Image (cartoon, rainbow, N blue to C red):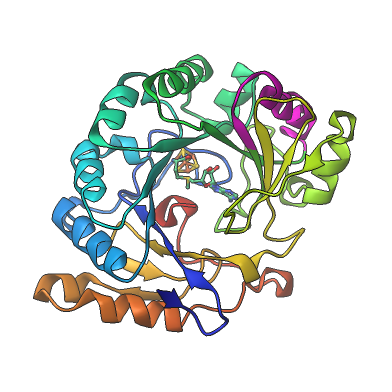
Amino acid sequence: MLIDPFGRAITYLRISVTDRCNFRCVYCLPESGVKWMPDEVLLSTDEIVRVAQAAARLGIYKIRLTGGEPLVRPDVLEIVERIKEIPGVTDLSLTTNGMLLDKLSKPLFEAGLDRVNISLDTLNPEKFKKVTRFGDFQKVWQGILAAEAAGLKPIKLNAVVVGGLNEDEVLAMASLSIEHPWHVRFIELMPVANKQDWGNGLPSVNERYVSVQIMHALLEPLKMEPLIVENSIGPERTFKVPGALGTVGFISPLGDHFCSKCNRLRLTADGWLRSCLLVDKEISLKEALKKGADLESFITQAVIEKPEGHKLKGHNCPEARHMSQIGG
Ligand code: SAM
Ligand code: SF4
């Protein structure tokens, strides 16, 4: 098993299969002028599978496909199918904006995907358009229902909470967990290359951040109770409204520093291993992949170099990539 110098077991790899996206969420990408990586720069299906195989040999058992939007990659079903066959990978999931789930949920399940996380920041169709710029709320809602019907369970919904935008909806969104067996997860806004003006009457930089403590205060009426999740690892904290079918979670890199529980590595769509989402330090796998070299030693090196934690509080923010290139 991979253990980093701070005693953390690294068991989880997030693979960004593309930087491309059919949305331009305000906190993730600018509205226009985004330059996608050329095809030849993106890892091929074979290369992605080889990295996943090497990771599994080192004890990584949990793999998540992300992006950009992973479902716009034409060979996403083949990637799922081939990673699912890797001995030792017992948990294969995908994070998506949900726009293409309506038609892809069933084929994804049949290809071997275990479950999906779907990003949903608001229940208001007009606001949804404003946040995602190209999204369609009804289509994403249909996608969530299609994923559930296809067996991609448990359904997890990710909402980035932004001041002046959707903080007034956290109660309604958390309440979805009462009648649905869904896990609704609130994420603090992270300052990753997204400090520019969002335009269109959207909140300014100083208004946007909402701490997990404020989210809890807004959710007070639900009287949520903390939940001890069996085998829980990773940075999330989980709660339950008494009697609810689902649960509510929080990812709070700033409000409640979570680095001591971090269990993950990230692979960017162009073949760099990143050991911390919030630190611009990466190791290239491209040459090793081209030469057919031993990938295990590179993965082990990334784990050895994994920073103890981010430095956001010292205003040391990652600037090198948009979130869509890292995969969240
Ligand atoms: N396109 C897919 C989606 O949106 O679910 C997968 C990639 S996206 C980069 C992964 C996650 O990162 C999403 O849940 C998104 O909301 C989150 N994210 C993007 N930018 C963020 C930011 N600045 N702060 C916090 N979360 C962010
Ligand atoms: Fe695309 Fe996901 Fe970024 Fe939104 S958060 S722009 S859906 S990659």
- 279 lies above or below 237: below
- 288 lies above or below 267: below
- 320 lies above or below 79: below
- Tell me if residue 168 is in the magenta stretch: yes
Q: In screen coordinates, is 114 left or right of 180?
A: left
- The image shows residue 156 at horizontal and vertical percentages of 54, 35
Farthest residue toward the front?
230
Residue bounds of the magenta highlight: 164-184
What residue is at 72 percent from the left and 75 percent from the top? 314
What residue is at 42 percent from the left and 24 percent from the top? 147
Front residue of 263 and 133? 263
Front residue of 38 and 1? 1
- The image shows residue 93 at horizontal and vertical percentages of 40, 43
- The quadrant where residue 171 appears: top right
What residue is at 11 percent from the left and 74 percent from the top? 292
Q: In screen coordinates, is 29 left or right of 90?
A: right
- The image shows residue 13 at horizontal and vertical percentages of 39, 60
- The quadrant where residue 21 appears: top left
- Tell me if residue 85 is in the magenta stretch: no
